Amino acid sequence: MRIEAYFDEPTWTLSYLVHDGDAGVVIDPVRHFDPASGHTSWAPAERLAATIDALGLDVPYVIDTHTHADHMTGLPFFRERYGARTVASSRIGDEQKRSNIQINGSTTREDFAAFRRAKDASLPAPRLILPSLQVNVRAGELPEPESNGESYLKIPINLLGRSAS
């Protein structure tokens, strides 16, 4: 079995291609999003696809290990190009409870919420949190097009975080 890591510098994200023989799976693929222009691209997914195609791999599954706040997911690329089924474990939350220093089996919802509010107040929001959430909750699909046929991301103004002044 081979595990190949693909580093995406703009998002500091690692994606993986795990393969053995003629089959492989893609883990945590990335779709680029440029907030300055609003353009997206499949460049990171294309890098993985070049290896998949060169090796002649079948890709039955593409996996997101968690909901990403730092980048848009590349799930649709692999679903469309290779017919890969998308996978996210329903037990991710359970495993995070067992292994996370912020939460464990005895942490109440209220305790966790208080901890996160205090911690988050001291941190800047991830750079792509708003666009990423709008796309990633749709398994990587862009929002439905408006009447002009274009998809839009909606960014609230002065709603989140602290004032810059």
Image: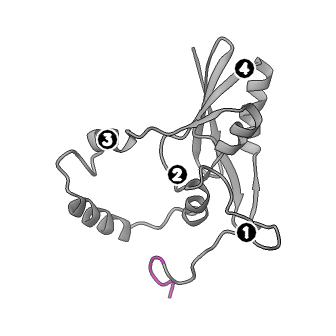
Residue 94 disc label: 3
Q: Residue flagged by tag 3: what amino acid is it?
A: Asp
Pointer 1 residue: 36
Picture residue at 80% right of the left edge, 21% below the top: 54
Picture residue at 41% right of the left edge, 40% below the top: 90
Residue 103 relative to residue 21: left or right: left
Mark 3 falls on what kind of element?
helix
Tell me the CA gap for discs 4 and 1: 36 Å
Pointer 4 residue: 57
Q: Earlier in the sequence, mark 4 or mark 3?
A: 4
Which color scheme did the rendering employ for the protein? one colour
Mark 2 falls on what kind of element?
loop
Q: Earlier in the sequence, mark 4 or mark 1?
A: 1
Instruction: Tell me the mark number nearer the camera, choosing from 1 and 3.
Output: 3
Crowd rating for badge 2 (residues with CA inside 10 Å; few <14, some 14–19, many 20+) = some
Magenta span includes 158: no
Pointer 2 residue: 68
User: How far across and down, in percent of the image, does residue 100 sit?
Assistant: 30, 44
Tell me the CA gap for discs 1 and 2: 20 Å
Furthest residue toward top: 21
Foreground residue among 148 and 140:
148
Q: Earlier in the sequence, mark 4 or mark 2?
A: 4
Crowd rating for badge 4 (residues with CA inside 10 Å; few <14, some 14–19, many 20+) = some
Q: Residue flagged by tag 1: what amino acid is it?
A: Ala
User: How far across and down, in percent of the image, does residue 156 sit?
Assistant: 57, 78
Q: Earlier in the sequence, mark 1 or mark 3?
A: 1
